[in-house]
Image: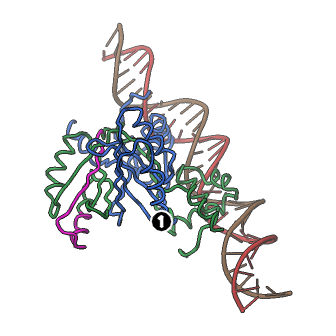
Chain colours: A green, B blue, C red, D brown
DNA sequence: TTGTTTCGCGCAATATTATTTCAAGAATGC
DNA sequence: GCATTCTTGAAATAATATTGCGCGAAACAA
């Protein structure tokens, strides 16, 4: 059920829905060159198999009053598994933290944060993040401007790669 | 036309579509408590006003064969505006670079990269990124595991904030 | 207050789309 | 070669999106 591999049409579907997640199934079917019913079945299968995790509107944070975006590099005192997942759970409870990734190297985690303004972020930083259990160090960098923000994966690279093996 | 502010229903719509971008308009209307036609009109208005930039399927990179995710911190030799935007344009042409944000502080840019495997990334790193014009330093960190990856903004925080002013 | 304008709503009608059903063609395995 | 399995596409049906329009509430003017 999940071990099934993807054929070129599946990958086209994924690429199209990554680019426009609200496309109608009729339009999608037209683009990938099959009729609507099998196209819809493929989409459902891709969803159930976990290739598609969900669909999200990309909202403009600034327009909504979130003027500040920050990357925070966090180092912990202890890297024991329990302590790592404790910190991850803290992050899950902090709405200002939108992403949390565990890294190798000097830093243990990188956090992507948003906030309405700098003082809101500073309050969060000092009262929540820095003062959390097990947090040893936090280094933050404000995002001055965004230059690229593409979703997901580059299917072009995937196709290239597959055509070489084949 | 664009200067119009958002009312609570607009924000509910945004929150719902951020959580599930493929929700039908009928379902969306039900959730925000109005009938379908005005709901659809609001969605269109939000799209045109730029509050909604687009919709994207959230695809599982690992399942698609992109085993490697990396954050790269890039320092440039020159931070003159021309050189900054030159580098940004380079990033836009690199499919493995999914995001590029300009930062304050020691580092000039943070890049989020994906690749099918480590060697593909290493090749990109040494032959493209590190050796690009004006690039002074690159420090990379592999993502060991992802703990949180929520889209967009926390509308809860926005509502909190608005209820205090009101 | 009263008249007027403006705005956004929802009903109803229509156009599109999603979804189910099913028979037939391709791929796979024995 | 033949049966099994899968997937497709046409057709029918259900659901959804979209348009047109009249109504009532809020904003505004006098």
What residue is disc 1 on?
A: B117
**Which one is in front, A59 or A103?**
A103
Q: Position of residue A32 (x, y in %)?
A: 66, 56
Look at the image and tell me in which quarter the C terminus of chain B lies.
top left
Residue name at image x 44 percent, y 54 percent? B20
Closer to the camera in the image, A85 or A38: A85
- Whether the magenta-drawn stretch holds residue A84 is answered as yes
Residue A43 picture quarter: bottom right
Q: Residues within 10 Å of mark 1 (few under 14, many from 20)?
A: few
Res B28 visible: yes
Magenta stretch, residue numbers: A67-89
- In the depicted view, which residue is nearer to us: B77 or A42? B77
Is residue B30 shown to the viewer in this render?
no
Q: In the rendered view, does A151 fall on the left or right side of D27?
A: right
Q: The residue tagged with tag 1: helix, strand or loop?
A: loop
Quarter of the picture holding the N terminus of chain B? top left
Q: Chain of mark 1?
A: B
User: How far from the left and from the top, in percent, is residue A157?
Assistant: 56, 57
């Amino acid at each position: 059920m999940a071990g099934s591999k993807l054929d070129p049409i599946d990958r086209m579907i994924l690429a199209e829905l990554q680019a426009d997640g609200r496309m109608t199934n009729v339009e999608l079917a037209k683009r990938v060159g099959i009729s609507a019913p099998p196209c819809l079945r493929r989409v459902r299968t891709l969803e159930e198999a976990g290739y598609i995790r969900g669909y999200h509107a990309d909202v403009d944070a600034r327009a909504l009053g979130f003027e500040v975006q920050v990357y925070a590099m966090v180092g912990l005192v202890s890297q024991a598994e329990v302590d790592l997942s404790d910190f991850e759970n803290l992050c899950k409870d902090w709405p200002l933290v939108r992403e949390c990734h565990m890294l190798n190297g000097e830093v243990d985690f990188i956090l992507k944060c948003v906030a309405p303004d700098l003082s809101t972020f500073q309050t969060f930083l000092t009262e929540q993040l820095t003062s959390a259990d097990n947090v040893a160090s936090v280094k933050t960098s404000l995002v001055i401007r965004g230059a690229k923000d593409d979703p997901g994966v580059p299917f072009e690279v995937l196709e290239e790669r597959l055509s070489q093996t084949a």
